Image: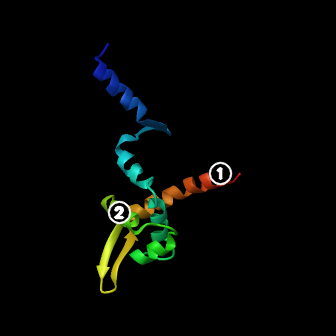
Amino acid sequence: MGSREDMRLHNKKKACMIEYMGTTVCIDPSLPFLNVIGKKYTMMILGVIGNRGSRKNFNEIIRDIPFSSTTIISRRLKELQNFELIQRDEDNNGVSYSLTDFGKNVRESLLPFLRMVENTLQD
């Protein structure tokens, strides 16, 4: 029998795993990312930036997310940049934001989940 610390480590490994199609996926490395995705306005920002075109400026993002706070939107944009989901571009027309390839993949991957939730909660 192992030490108490060994038992905790073993239980942590079991708790962070999801079995899927004959493989095991660990949740732990995704927790910081999932934390950002779950924050207020994050999903809306990913939606707005990905809708109808590839670039949005700050004012377009604020306009398209009703009742949003400029402070929180600004904070979320920085967090999304840190996770390389969006990129900030500066040119003669000003600053704009676009999805990275990773951001596009995440956005697309989340759509079936969001549709399922939407359909389930409408019933």
Secondary element under disc 1, as helix, strand or loop, is helix
| Residue 15: quarter of image | top left
- Mark identifier at residue 121: 1
Q: Amino acid at mark 2?
A: Arg
Element on which disc 2 rests: helix
Whether residue 55 is situated above or below residue 114 in the rendered picture = below
Q: Is residue 30 visible?
A: no
Q: Nearer the viewer, mark 1 or mark 2?
A: 2
Q: Amino acid at mark 1?
A: Leu
Estimate the x, y position of residue 81 in percent, counting from the top left.
33, 63
How far apart are labels 1 and 2 at the CA level?
30 Å
In the figure, 63 relative to 106: above or below?
A: below
Q: Residue furthest top?
A: 1
Q: Residues within 10 Å of mark 1 (few under 14, many from 20)?
A: few
Question: What residue is at 41 percent from the left and 62 percent from the top?
Answer: 103
Placement of the N terminus among the 4 image quadrants: top left
Of residues 113 and 23, which is closer to you in this image? Answer: 113
* Direction from residue 91 to residue 104 in the image, left or right: right
Extreme residue in the bottom direction = 92
Quadrant for residue 40, please give it: bottom left
Asked whether, in this view, residue 1 is left or right of residue 40, the answer is: left
Q: Which mark is residue 37?
A: none
Q: Position of residue 62 (x, y in %)?
A: 45, 72
Residues 103 and 71: in front is: 71
Instruction: Tell me where residue 54 appears, x and y as whole percent.
Output: 43, 75
Q: Position of residue 22 (x, y in %)?
A: 48, 36
Residue ID for mark 2: 75
Q: Is residue 17 visible?
A: yes
Q: Which residue is drawn at the image coordinates 56% and 55% (left, top)?
A: 114
